[in-house]
């Protein structure tokens, strides 16, 4: 490991880190918010001089829900979990009891599958009721002018009790590939495929029902070594530009995971309608996390939050991927990074550079879970071991996120 350091205005900066910032983050002169690379380092170190940047105690935090950017595979998994299959969630989780005849196993359980479809239609009846009848009796869905029309098995045609719940579609009006409904701020997409595994056996050719379960993905930039810090910031830059990807093997096959794109649809009035493909990202900033790449004149490492915040505006200046925000884990962390953000915002001439500091986010999450009144057994969690790290992270499964979203918006049948 290269441990050489450069002295810049009394601060010790690792040479490897300097080269990374200069060659990758400050590589495009015409897009630079500073007069030169030297100008950046002078302003950065001057800010350190003006700010109380001592570490706040030892790094004892252990945020199980944080996903390290050192391993983009699982960061992308969490970011891409905005949408999930209702059929899959109901089939695998406990909303439908795993009782005799309805148990899951190596083979597909037809009886459980039938119950899943019925349960999903009950959900549609609860969240998107028809003027008459039930989604269980639907044989076709179509768009007539700006309204969703549903033909039932008895030949009658009905609409939604609340027509405005239909917001968009893809494919022709008479035979759509998908329709998108909205209940409160949650989107639900009904997908059709006459030749599909599910659609071929369904009266209305419904292949699946996708539910939007948006939740911020909390990312960590903490690193143990200088090389890890450079790799994490490199991955953050790729995430901000929408180019982050991860290659891995699963079941003997090569896989590549990328950030889900937004989906462009046609709104009910014929205009464009876009639904978000992935979750927004939040970087949690700790006042007690040391940055191995930057230290003061006495060799004491500086808080990683200060360094990460200073580089954040550079990394996100051409943001085209998912939205990225900063979150302070404590009041001290907020006081550390706020002047850094203010300085870089005031120095930027870009109207697109917007940075929001989120505070007390963990308390908000706890309040949201309590208000949802969701049984604990319906919030499954999995432990995911990251190959490149010595610790583990906890991610909510996509199935759990789907069921949670339905519960929060009162759409789960009883």
Image: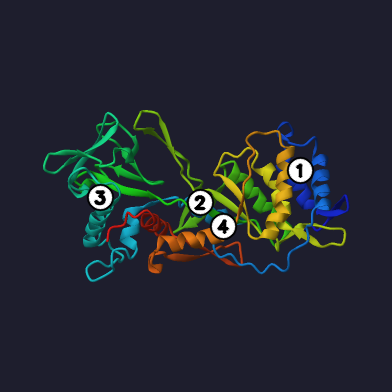
Residue that numbered label 4 is attached to: 361
Q: Is residue 279 left or right of residue 342?
A: left
Would you say the residues marked 4 and 2 are in contact, meaning their CB atoms lie under 8 Å apart? Answer: no
| Count of marks, rendered view | 4
Element marked by disc 3? helix
Please tell me whether residue 131 is drawn above or below residue 333 in the rendered image.
above
Residue that numbered label 3 is attached to: 125
Specify which label sits upstream in the sequence, 2 or 1: 1
Q: Is residue 245 left or right of residue 113?
A: right
Can the viewer see residue 99? yes
Q: Calculate the distance from the C-alpha at mark 1 to the C-alpha at mark 3.
A: 57 Å
Specify which label sits upstream in the sequence, 2 or 3: 2
Element marked by disc 1? helix
Q: Calculate the distance from the C-alpha at mark 3 to the C-alpha at mark 4.
A: 34 Å
Specify which label sits upstream in the sequence, 3 or 4: 3
Q: Nearer the viewer, mark 2 or mark 3?
A: 3
Residue that numbered label 1 is attached to: 22
Q: Calculate the distance from the C-alpha at mark 2 to the C-alpha at mark 3.
A: 30 Å
Residue that numbered label 2 is attached to: 79
Q: Quadrant of the C terminus?
A: bottom left
Q: Is residue 272 left or right of residue 309?
A: left
């Amino acid at each position: 490991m290269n441990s050489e350091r450069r002295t810049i205005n009394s601060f010790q900066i690792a040479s490897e880190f300097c080269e990374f910032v200069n060659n990758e983050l400050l590589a495009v002169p015409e897009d630079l918010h500073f007069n030169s690379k030297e100008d950046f380092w002078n302003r950065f170190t001057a800010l350190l001089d003006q700010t109380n940047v001592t570490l706040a105690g030892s790094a004892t935090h252990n945020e199980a829900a944080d996903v390290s950017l050192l391993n983009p595979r699982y960061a992308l998994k969490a970011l891409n979990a905005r949408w999930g299959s209702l059929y899959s969630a109901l089939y695998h989780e406990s909303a439908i009891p795993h009782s005799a005849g309805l148990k899951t196993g190596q083979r597909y359980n037809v009886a459980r599958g039938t119950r899943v479809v019925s349960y999903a239609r009950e959900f549609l009846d609860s969240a998107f009721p028809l003027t008459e009848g039930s989604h269980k009796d639907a044989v076709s869905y179509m768009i007539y002018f700006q309204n969703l029309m549903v033909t039932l098995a008895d030949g009658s045609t009905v609409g939604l009790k609340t027509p405005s719940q239909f917001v968009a579609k893809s494919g022709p009006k008479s035979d759509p590939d998908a329709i998108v409904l909205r209940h409160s701020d949650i989107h639900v997409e009904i997908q059709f495929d006459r030749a599909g595994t599910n659609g071929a056996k369904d009266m209305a050719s419904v292949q699946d029902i996708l539910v939007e379960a948006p939740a911020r993905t909390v990312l960590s930039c903490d690193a143990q070594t200088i090389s890890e810090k450079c790799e994490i910031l490199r991955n953050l830059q790729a995430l901000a530009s929408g180019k982050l990807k991860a290659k891995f093997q699963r079941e003997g096959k090569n896989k590549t995971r990328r950030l889900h794109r937004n989906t462009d649809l046609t709104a009910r009035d014929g205009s464009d309608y876009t639904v978000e493909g992935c979750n927004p990202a939040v970087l949690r900033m700790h006042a007690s996390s040391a940055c191995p790449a930057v230290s003061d004149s006495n060799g004491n490492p500086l808080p990683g939050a200060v360094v990460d915040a200073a580089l954040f505006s550079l990394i996100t200046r051409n943001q085209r991927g998912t939205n990225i925000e900063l979150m302070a884990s404590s009041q001290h962390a907020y006081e550390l990074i706020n002047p850094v953000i203010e300085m870089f915002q005031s120095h930027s001439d870009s109207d697109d550079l917007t940075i929001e500091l989120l505070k007390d986010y963990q308390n908000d999450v706890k309040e949201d879970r309590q208000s949802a009144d969701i049984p604990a057994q319906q919030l499954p969690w999995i432990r995911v071991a990251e190959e490149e790290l010595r610790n583990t992270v906890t991610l909510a499964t996509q199935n759990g996120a789907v069921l949670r979203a339905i519960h929060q918006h009162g759409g789960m049948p009883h």
